[in-house]
């Protein structure tokens, strides 16, 4: 056994998915669901870097909120990754450099990051769908 505390990745994915739903409550639920579905497809088909590229290109369509929460989630993983700061460079440049130099560098970490980001997008998609059907928030984090 190790002395490190275990991290419940499913819980983190659910928490950040709920945050996305809360931050997009002024948007049409179907638009949020559409963004989550498309981002999930890009993540699954093309990978983490491509998913960030896709969302950064869709800033006005909820992409900025999703990118921010994806970065928050990655910062909570036990790898010592710090959310990139906004210096004097465009946000996209900073984010993409962080993804390429930190996240995609190590295969094991990349695979874990991809899995937890995928779970977060799935939960956010279902949260948007639930809101569209009359629910007020994302479904609870219980699984």
Image (tube, grey):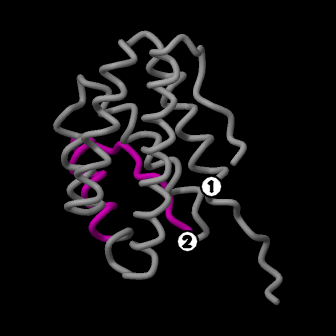
Question: Is 29 situated left or right of 31 in this image?
Answer: right
Q: Where is residue 23 shown, x and y percent of the image?
A: 49, 22
Whether the magenta-drawn stretch holds residue 90 is answered as yes
Outermost residue toward the left in this view: 57
Q: Where is residue 57 shown, x and y percent of the image?
A: 16, 37
Q: Where is residue 112 shown, x and y percent of the image?
A: 48, 70
Q: Secondary structure at mark 1?
A: helix
Whether 105 is drawn above or below 117: the answer is below
Residue 74, numbered circle = none
Which quadrant of the view contains residue 139? top right
Q: Nearer the observer, disc 1 or disc 2?
A: 1
Q: Secondary structure at mark 2?
A: loop
Q: What residue is drawn where x is 23% and y is 23%? A: 60
Whether 53 is drawn above or below 77: the answer is above
Q: What residue is drawn where x is 49% and y is 47%? A: 120
Cα separation, mark 1 vs mark 2, equals 17 Å
- The quadrant the N terminus occupies is bottom right
* Magenta residues, start to end: 80-101
Question: Is 133 situated left or right of 60 in this image?
Answer: right
Q: What residue is drawn where x is 32% and y is 48%? A: 40
Question: Is 35 situated left or right of 77 in this image?
Answer: left
Residue sitting nearer the eye, 14 or 67: 14
Crowding near the residue tagged with mark 2, few <14, some 14–19, many ≥20 C-alpha atoms within 10 Å: few
Q: Earlier in the sequence, mark 1 or mark 2?
A: 1
Which quadrant of the view contains residue 77? bottom right
Circle 2 sits on which residue? Answer: 79
Residue 10, numbered circle = 1
Whether the magenta-drawn stretch holds residue 97 is answered as yes
């Amino acid at each position: 056994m190790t002395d490190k505390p275990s991290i419940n990745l499913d819980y983190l994915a659910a928490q950040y998915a709920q945050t996305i739903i809360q931050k997009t409550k002024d948007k049409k639920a179907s638009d949020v669901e559409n963004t989550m579905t498309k981002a999930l497809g890009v993540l699954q088909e093309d990978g983490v870097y491509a998913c960030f590229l896709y969302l950064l290109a869709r800033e006005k369509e909820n992409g900025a909120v999703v990118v921010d929460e994806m970065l928050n989630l990655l910062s909570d993983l036990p790898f010592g990754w710090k959310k990139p700061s906004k210096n004097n460079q465009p946000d996209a440049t900073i984010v993409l450099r962080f993804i390429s130099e930190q996240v995609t560098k190590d295969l094991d970490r990349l695979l874990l990051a991809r899995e937890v980001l995928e779970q977060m997008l799935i939960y956010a998609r279902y949260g948007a769908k639930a809101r569209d059907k009359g629910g007020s928030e994302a479904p609870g984090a219980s699984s």
